[in-house]
Each structure stands twice: as structure tokens, then as C-alpha cells.
Image: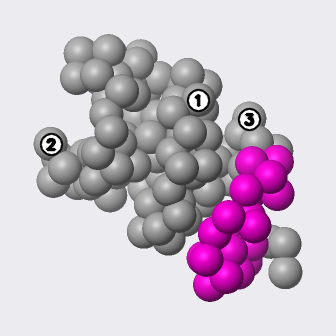
Amino acid sequence: MVAFLEKLADLMGGTTKNALPLRVAAEMAEVYGLFQSKNPEISVPFLKLAIAAGDLSAMPPTEALVRAQGRMKYIRPLYRAMFNQPSTKNDALRIFQEVRHTYHPIAEKMVAQDLGLN
């Protein structure tokens, strides 16, 4: 599942222009229970795809993950995905401002840079 989601994310490019159709993202989430996955190796690639597809139901699990997880490997791609979508850009900024103090200083600096907050 991890390799499939990573390959799919690479093929889609993470942009709205090349995004997975919203219907497909929603069906994948439902069939495979991807929004409920506690494994960030599975949830992060899928959440990136769902956000790019415009699936706003991806926001609660995305927010929960970036609030609970501090590893740059997981949080940076999610913040970038949120920041790159007009519908979730403000969410990315809001969430980061609320939790940035909980991150390691290097992670905080790198995410701030990703979000143009330097």
C-alpha cells in the first residue's frame, strides 16, 4: 500500500491540475479506510493526494496528524500540500501558528520556510 500511494502521489504531482479526481480519492478513503490509518507511512501520501483532489474531509485527519506528529518527514509534505491549495492554505497557516512551538526548532524553521513565514 505504501509503495502504491507514493507512486500515485509521484504520478499526480501534488497539484490541483494533475490531481486525482475527488470521487476517486473519496472512494479510496472509504474502501481502504485511509483516513483512519494510524500509520503515517500510509496516511501521509494519501492525505497529500486527497488534499490535492480538493477533498476537504481530509482536513480533520491531516490536522490531527500534524498536531500529534513532529517529524519533518511527515509534517512538511502535509503543510506544503495544504499551503498549495487555495481552499486549505489558511488552514495550513492557522494550524502551524497554533502548534509551531511544539516542533523541534529545525522542523519549525523548515515548515515556516515552506509556508513563506520567514
- Measured Cα–Cα span from mark 2 to mark 1: 22 Å
Q: Quadrant of residue 109?
A: bottom right
Please give the name of the residue rendered at 40% of the width and 49% of the height, measured from the top-left corner: 44
Q: Quadrant of the C terminus?
A: bottom right
CB atoms of marks 1 and 3 within 8 Å: no
**At numbered mark 2, what does the secondary structure look like: helix, strand or loop?**
loop
Name the side, left or right, on which 3 lies relative to 90: left
Q: Is residue 64 visible?
A: yes
Mark 3 belongs to which amino acid?
Answer: Ser
Residue designated by label 2: 1
Query: Does label 2 or label 3 sit earlier along the sequence?
Result: 2
Q: How many marks?
A: 3
**At numbered mark 3, what does the secondary structure look like: helix, strand or loop?**
loop
Please give the name of the residue rendered at 76% of the width and 42% of the height, measured from the top-left corner: 91
- Measured Cα–Cα span from mark 2 to mark 3: 28 Å
Residue interval drawn in magenta: 94-115
Residue 84 magenta-drawn? no
Question: Which numbered marker is on residue 60?
Answer: 1
Foreground label between 2 and 1:
1
Give 4 or 38, whichever is nearer the viewer.
38
- Measured Cα–Cα span from mark 1 to mark 3: 14 Å
Residue 106 magenta-drawn? yes
- For the stretch drawn in magenta, the main secondary structure is helix
Question: Which numbered marker is on residue 97?
Answer: none
Residue designated by label 3: 87
